[in-house]
Image: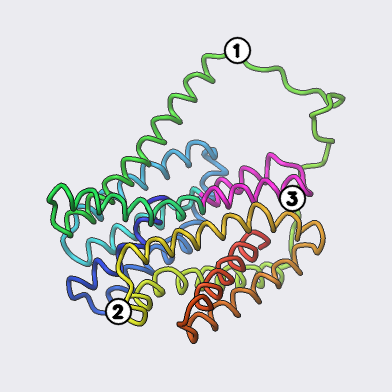
């Protein structure tokens, strides 16, 4: 997700500087989400057969490749291809969620674990825009052209994914070398009760509703990140440093909501009411920030939208 954080803060303005049309910019922005929507169910299903850890490593390798494709692309189509690859291998997030759902017993512990996982994923979106701005400023001081500065930021994000993959391999090697721990007995204090981990099957209508909500939350995130980049550039006169700071702050607010608010709201109100509150915040925030440009009200509406996004996404 660090690569996605770099992409959402740089690609719209990067392509706009080279005369890309709004359709091309929208295609490059949406390619990630389209590939993620189509391929994530397939990748998660494959992880059930091949193993979660093995598929997660493949996703890290794919994220490395996606960053390098964007960095080496000199055309809009090449950038779109890199975004498609990034969306395919962004399935690491739902694969991790599936693993957590299998490990943790149902209840408050599972809710907290999923909230922390979502916060960890969004941390990449927090750091990505800030990292992109810092790296571009550093490379510009070294004398690189603006185009090469953006490319170098994508190379850096690809190297981060590659480093995580290498660390994972080293950790697995140490675990394989260590003697296996005895399985916990049913009477041990830390062992979950038999039958505590189970699947909760939802009716087809409920599944359809959940997917519709997830689609709406994902679309709102596109509006508040990628589309907002062009809005702030044209309507507010923001440059890349201001935009990167705003996107990082918005993602940080989302992470804070997932860690601090979501577990408490779920315990007090349940999943459905918590999701409804999140959707109301998203709607009110988007409507407000699109109409109000005076500060600090514009910032307040933007952060309200990002808080609602974190609540609605995690509760869903």
- Label 1 Cα crowd, 10 Å radius (few <14 / some 14-19 / many 20+): few
Residue 78, percent from left and from top: 22, 61
- Dot 3 corresponds to which residue? 199
- Left or right: 56 as drawn, with respect to 285: left
Per the model, the C-alpha gap separating discs 3 and 2 is: 42 Å
- Label 3 Cα crowd, 10 Å radius (few <14 / some 14-19 / many 20+): few
Of the two numbered discs 3 and 1 in the rendering, the one whose residue sits closer to the viewer: 1
- The part of the image, by quadrant, that contains residue 293 is bottom left
Write the residue at 53% across / 44% down. 47
**Vertical position of residue 128 compared to residue 9: above or below:** above
**Residue 94 on the magenta span:** yes
Residue 289, percent from left and from top: 50, 80
Marks 1 and 2, the one that precedes in the sequence? 2
Write the residue at 17% across / 59% down. 147
Per the model, the C-alpha gap separating discs 1 and 2 is: 56 Å
- Left or right: 166 as drawn, with respect to 198: left
- Label 2 Cα crowd, 10 Å radius (few <14 / some 14-19 / many 20+): few
- Dot 1 corresponds to which residue? 179
- Dot 2 corresponds to which residue? 23
For the C terminus, give its image quadrant: bottom right
- Left or right: 22 as drawn, with respect to 5: left
- The part of the image, by quadrant, that contains residue 210 is bottom right
Write the residue at 48% across / 63% down. 37
**Vertical position of residue 158 compared to residue 177: above or below:** below
Label total for image: 3
Label 3 SS? loop
**Residue 282 on the magenta span:** no
Residues drawn in magenta? 93-121
Label 2 SS? helix
* Main secondary structure type of the part rendered in magenta: helix
Marks 3 and 2, the one that precedes in the sequence? 2
């Amino acid at each position: 997700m660090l690569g996605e954080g770099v992409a959402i803060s740089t690609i719209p303005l990067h392509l706009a500087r080279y005369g890309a049309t709004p359709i091309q910019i929208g295609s490059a922005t949406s390619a990630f989400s389209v590939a993620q929507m189509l391929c994530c169910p397939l990748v998660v299903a494959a992880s059930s057969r091949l193993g979660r850890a093995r598929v997660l490593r493949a996703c890290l390798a794919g994220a490395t490749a996606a960053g390098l494709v964007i960095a080496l692309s000199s055309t809009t189509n090449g950038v779109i291809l890199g975004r498609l690859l990034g969306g395919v291998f962004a399935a690491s997030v739902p694969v991790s969620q599936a693993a957590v759902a299998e490990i943790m017993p149902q209840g408050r512990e599972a809710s907290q674990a999923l909230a922390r996982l979502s916060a960890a994923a969004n941390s990449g979106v927090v750091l990505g825009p800030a990292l992109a701005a810092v790296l571009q400023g550093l490379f510009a001081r070294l004398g690189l052209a603006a185009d090469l500065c953006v490319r170098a930021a994508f190379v850096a994000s690809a190297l981060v994914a590659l480093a995580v993959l290498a660390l994972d391999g080293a950790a697995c090697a140490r675990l394989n070398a260590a003697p296996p721990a005895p399985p916990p007995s049913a009477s041990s204090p830390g062992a979950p009760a038999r039958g505590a981990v189970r699947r909760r099957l939802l009716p087809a209508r409920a599944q359809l509703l959940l997917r519709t909500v997830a689609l709406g939350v994902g679309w709102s995130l596109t509006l508040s990140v990628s589309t907002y980049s062009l809005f702030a550039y044209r309507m507010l006169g923001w440059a890349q440093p201001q935009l990167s700071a705003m996107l990082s702050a918005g993602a940080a607010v989302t992470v804070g909501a997932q860690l601090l608010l979501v577990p408490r709201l779920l315990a007090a109100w349940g999943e459905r009411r918590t999701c409804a509150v999140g959707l109301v915040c998203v709607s009110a925030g988007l409507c407000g920030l699109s109409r109000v440009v005076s500060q600090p009200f514009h910032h307040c509406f933007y952060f309200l939208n990002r808080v609602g996004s974190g609540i609605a996404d995690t509760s869903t």
